[in-house]
Structures are given as C-alpha cells and as structure tokens.
Amino acid sequence: MSESPTKQQRSIGWMGLKRGHRARPSEWIAEKLIFAVSLSSIVTIFLIFLFVGRMTLPIVFEQMNSAAVQPVIPVERLGSMTKSEVMSYLELTEKQYAGMDQETLRSLMEVKVEAAKEATTTDKDDSVNTTRWRYLLLPQQWSGYDRPEYIWQPISRIHKYNIMPLVLGSLKTTLVALLVGVPLALGAALYISQLASQRVQETVKPCIELLAGVPSVVTGFFMLIVMATVLKQVFGYESRLNAFVAGVGLSLAVIPVVFSISEDALTSVPRSYTQAALALGASRWQAAWQVVLPSAMPGVFAAVVLGFGRAIGETMIVLMASGNASIMSASLLDSTRTITASIAAELAEAVFGGHHYRILFTIGLLLFVVTFVCNFIGDLVVHRLKLRLEGKA
C-alpha cells in the first residue's frame, strides 16, 4: 500500500515545478503574451464604453437643444461669454473651437442673429427641444397631426427623435426570429443528440453549424431578392418588406447559435438517464422529450437567451429586409425599422457631435442595456433551474 507524500516531499515537488517553469523561457513569454492579450481586450471594451458614454451624456442629462428657433445672444456679448458657453451656443466641438479665432466666432454669431431675423414662423414646434426624454419616449401632438404620435423623423426642419417605433420594430423582428428559429433549432438539436444515427449526426450537424459562417449581408440579400417575393405570394400581404420577412431572415442567424448550445447541453446529460427511461419501457422519443430535455433545460434556456441577443443585435438582415419604415404598428406584416438599422443607415450622414449623432449613440447604449438586462435575467433563471434540478430549491 503506497503512502501519501509528506509535506516536505510535496514542498520539494512544488519547488521542482517552479524551477522547471523558470527553466522554460518560452512558457514565460507565452504566459505574458496571453496576459497582454486579455488585458488589451478588457482595456478595449472599457474604452468603447468610455467613448459611447461621452457621446451620450449630453442626451442623458438633457444638455442639448435641437429647437429650430433658439434664443439669440447678441454679438457684443462674445467677450463676456465663457468657452463652454460659446461652444454650447455655436454647437462646436473642442477641436473646432481650438481652430477658430475671435473673428470667426463673431461671424458665426452674426449668422445666428441673421437666421433668427429671417425666421418669421409662428409654429409652436419650432421652440421644442426634441432631445428631451419626454419627446424621446412619449407621444407628442405635432402641428398638422390630429392626435399625439410616436415619430422618428431626424431629417426635417423639426427634428423628431421618438425612439419607440425603433424599439417596437426591434422587438417585432426579434420575436419572429425566436418563434421561427428556436423550435427548428431545438428540434434539430434533440434529434441529432438523441435519435439520429452516427452517420446522420456526422452529416447534418456540420451543415447546420455552417449557417453561422454565412455573412449576414448574404442572408439579407437573399431575403430581399428571393424570400420577400416568395413569402408575399404565399401569404398575400401588402408590404413586400416587413417585420415578418426580416424576422424569418434573422431566424437563419439564430438557428446555428441555439442549435450548437442546445445540442451540447442535451449531449452532456448522462446516458444513464436515457438507459433508465428505456429500461422502464419508454420509447427513445419519450426518453428524449420527457427525460433528457427537462434535464438539459438550463443549457437550452441559455441558448435561447443568446439567440435573443444575436437577433436583436443583428444589423444587415433587418436593414435590407424590414422595409425601414418607422411605423408605430403592432402588425408583423407592416414595414418596420429597428435600432440597429437606424444606426447603420444614419450614422454616416449625421453631423459629428450634433444632436442626431448623439441620439444614435444613445439608442445604441439603450440596446446594450436591454441586452445586458436580458442576459442577467437569463443567468438568474438558468441558476434557478440548475438548483431545482439538483433538488436544492
């Protein structure tokens, strides 16, 4: 019977391992490189959040003014104004302000004065600051409208930035993607992991996972040119591009994600569960549906949550197949516009540092917050399901 090593022997062995580690400079270099890569990833993520936060702070704290008609400051007051006041009044960035002399600033203020003199409109909407949160989230009765409306219309004389049509559009396309993609992916994962032969597994599984390698722009182009026409002919709706078409396209991006994670979760269930069910007289299908699937539910739920994040964050498919009409409609057959499509389509045309530019960063931050909250709730549910399966809750 072998004796367990003494404390001194373990200490000598540990010292030998340390000396052996020091004797290999390549391992030390590899360790430092891995540390540098991980640190750079963390720093990059931090810098991204810092940049996005810097862009969105004026909107979050309602420090910007998008009103078409704003109070005019006389040119004579330029000398008594602070740097921040001048930058805010003339809507200048730090770099732009640094490259201007007093004469240029005076000319810009004179332009503001002349523009105010020419503005003879009496429209009450001209003085509305549409970047305030009440106009971003709540309906507003604008001039010419019979009732309060949710309107996203950033390119107009009166900039309207209500984000609710974009939020609704994102939710509609994501809902369709999950309703179409999750049953298909979960059914395929259950079949491949529990019912299919080895030959079928080796053939079908790589084919489904290859969908993840298809560029989203290719999927969007396919939906735009082919499937939009086919689905319209089959269902007979009016708008060729709508939330339903975009959601079906998104399901092609969701299926490989949900399938891969669900298949791994189902495969990790001990074979003894299936064997016990078969020994009690259950069929293979009953064992897979009533025993294996409930046991793998935490992993399956995690797959659905990740599929939700993949769908709501997709850009090119919804940009090409949704119709890009910011309509406040609950119908899946109406054209719609999502948050990601708005950012992709409008960011290049927005004035850097302007209110439209910062609004786009704000809805991007909102998208991140929604995704983070959903993942957090999903993690809590997965943890609760694990405890329940283990009999601890």
Image: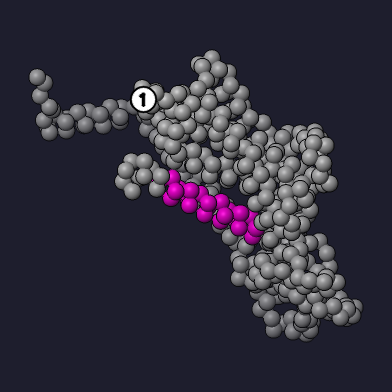
Quadrant hosting residue 200 = top right
Is residue 297 in view from this perspective?
A: yes
Quadrant hosting residue 352 = bottom right
Q: Determine the secondary structure under disc 1.
A: loop
Residue 59 location in percent, x, y? 64, 67
- Above/below status of 192 relative to 293: above
- Above/below status of 56 relative to 388: below
The quarter of the image holding the N terminus is top left
Q: Residue at x 78, y 71 (%)?
A: 147
The one of 101 and 174 positioned closer to us in this rendering: 174
The one of 120 and 13 positioned closer to us in this rendering: 120
How many other residues sit within 10 Å of disc 1, few (<14), some (14-19) or many (≥20)?
few
- Above/below status of 91 relative to 172: below
Q: Residue at x 84, y 68 (%)?
A: 157
**Exactly how many numbered labels are in the figure?**
1
Residue 79 location in percent, x, y? 72, 82
- The residue wearing badge 1 is 280
Q: Residue at x 60, y 61 (%)?
A: 54
The one of 379 and 188 positioned closer to us in this rendering: 188
Q: How is the image coloured?
A: one colour
Q: Is residue 282 magenta?
A: no
Residue 221 location in percent, x, y? 77, 36
Prevailing secondary structure of the magenta residues: helix
In the image, the segment drawn in magenta is 361-383
Q: Name the residue type under label 1.
A: Leu
Is residue 352 in view from this perspective?
A: no
Q: Residue furthest top?
A: 199
Q: Residue at x 68, y 66 (%)?
A: 136
Residue 333 location in percent, x, y? 76, 48
Residue 295 in the figure: left or right of residue 301: left
